[in-house]
Amino acid sequence: MAIDTKIWTGPGRPAVFLDRDGTINEEVKYLGSPHQLRLIPGVAEAIARLNQVSIPVIVVTNQSGIARGYYTEDDVQDVHNYMDKLLADHGASVSAYYYCPHHPDAIVKKYAVDCECRKPRIGMLSAAAAQENVSLSQAYVVGDKRSDLRAAVNAGARGILVRTGYGTKTEEELLHESEATGAALVTNIVDDLAAAVEQILSQLNQSQPQSVKPPKFASTYRHHRPELGQHYPH
């Protein structure tokens, strides 16, 4: 599916883009079932803080497990439904979920695409910026992988690395590269999403966003917050 990657940097709202696995929930390789989902402690409360000041929280996640045949798009929807339920239990919510199901070496041929939505490319971010009426120049991208940081740079947003998930390993790699090259480590690194939100709220100007009509973008792999399903693990 083609995605327009033009960056929308008009007078939209600031937003916080969150990686999913290792940032919101505990890292599980190829998580494809609600039974595997566990929120990282403090995450729901951190998202609720953003909700309270009307900052959109948008999940952008690479899900190559679909392309590899480990699970389906419906399975991803089920995981997001259950994540909504767990967050709602703490008074928190996600505005929208965007996911990339592609991989160039896919087993499921229809997903064998060298796409523009897989991070560190910015297809999900730019589509969300238009569809959710937010400004990438005022946005933050929080994640535990190098691809999250690169996506932030590519989109003109501000990246924050968390040490949860693969974050500690990513930090070690960045520090090693910094020492090897003598370059200064400019990556913003915090312990977890709660610390990231604390920093974001201290930096963002809480001015009333202007009302604008965003440009039309091609449709993308997006989940609105759906009605919660009935069957979840206990």
Image (cartoon, helix red, strand yellow):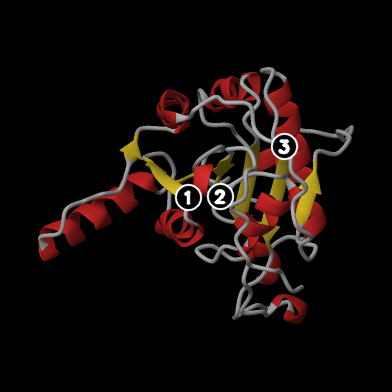
- Percent across and percent down for residue 81 are 78, 38
Which residue position is annotated with label 2?
136
Q: Secondary structure at mark 1?
A: loop
At a point 61% along the width and 55% down the height, the residue shown is 125
Which of the pair 75/184 is nearer the observer? Answer: 184
Q: Is residue 185 left or right of residue 56?
A: left
Q: Quadrant of residue 150?
A: bottom left
At a point 71% along the width and 69% down the height, the residue shown is 3
Which residue position is annotated with label 1?
157
**Disc 2/disc 3 C-alpha distance (Å):** 16 Å
Residues under numbered marks 1 and 2 in contact, where contact means CB atoms less than 8 Å apart: yes
Q: Nearer the viewer, mark 2 or mark 3?
A: 2
Q: Quadrant of residue 84?
A: top right
Q: Secondary structure at mark 2?
A: helix
Which residue position is annotated with label 3?
95
At a point 60% along the width and 80% down the height, the residue shown is 104
Type of the residue with mark 2: Leu
**Disc 1/disc 3 C-alpha distance (Å):** 18 Å
- Percent across and percent down for residue 152 are 47, 54
Q: Secondary structure at mark 3?
A: loop
- Which badge, 2 or 3, is on the more N-terminal residue? 3
In this rendering, is residue 196 above or below 154?
above
- Percent across and percent down for residue 124 are 64, 58
